[in-house]
Image: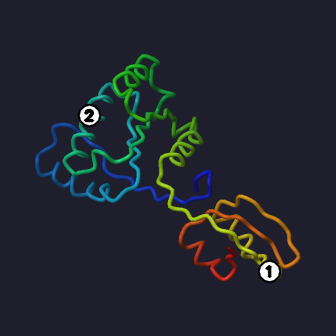
Amino acid sequence: MLPDNREATVTDTVGFIRKLPHDLVEAFKSTLEEVVYSDVLLHVVDSSSSTAALQVEVVEEVLKELGAGEKPTILVLNKVDKASEEQINSLRDKFSKHNIIEISAKSGENLDGLLEECTKVLPYKLKSFKVLIPYSDSSTVAYLHRNAKVESEEYEEQGTLVKVQGDEEVYNKCKAYIIE
């Protein structure tokens, strides 16, 4: 769940190793073909590795071959707790045109920052709408708080007036209560 209550599906793909046999490279490419359908790519790299920059370049080359080279991408420098300041600075400098987030998955360092960045980069496919939900259906109000971004909530004589940003599923669930 992202900070704005949107859900995201994360798919982990194989890592890249340079100089693999050709048939293995082709097999790896076939597992990556689904990235073409992604809204955003999180390119996670071990920032403590001496070959981190090369790994980024190899991945970008394969993404271009797959037609996904222009996808919105966040370059996630992982293991910043293990990497030297020199390694981090070198990656920042070399890939300065990239959207870079530094994290440690192990310690949890800056994972909130990564989620915030995902929220900014993911396309917004939410609809804004108002619903007037009868007090007898308070479970729908609770559903909205769990599954949508509630912008405002007021208590009226006829029920709870809620201004919401939600996806198609949320919109359809609340269709009977939509006003305006």
Q: Residue furthest front?
A: 180
Residue type for callout 1: Pro
Q: Residues within 10 Å of mark 1 (few under 14, many from 20)?
A: some
Label 2 element class: helix
Foreground tag (1 vs 2): 1
Residue at the image point whose x is 19% and y is 55% from the top: 27
Specify the color scheme: rainbow
Is residue 154 rendered to the left or right of residue 19? right
Q: x, y (%) of residue 11?
A: 40, 56
What separation in Å lies between label 1 and label 2 (alpha carbons)? 56 Å
166, above or below 116, in the image: below
Q: x, y (%) of residue 115?
A: 55, 46
Is residue 63 rendered to the left or right of residue 83? left
Residue 134, which numbered label? 1
Q: x, y (%) of residue 124?
A: 51, 56
Residue at the image point whose x is 35% and y is 28% from the top: 95
Residue 57, which numbered label? 2
Q: x, y (%) of residue 78?
A: 45, 35
Quarter of the rendering containing residue 56: top left
Quarter of the rendering containing residue 149: bottom right
Q: Earlier in the sequence, mark 1 or mark 2?
A: 2
Residue type for callout 2: Glu
Residue at the image point whose x is 62% and y is 51% from the top: 3
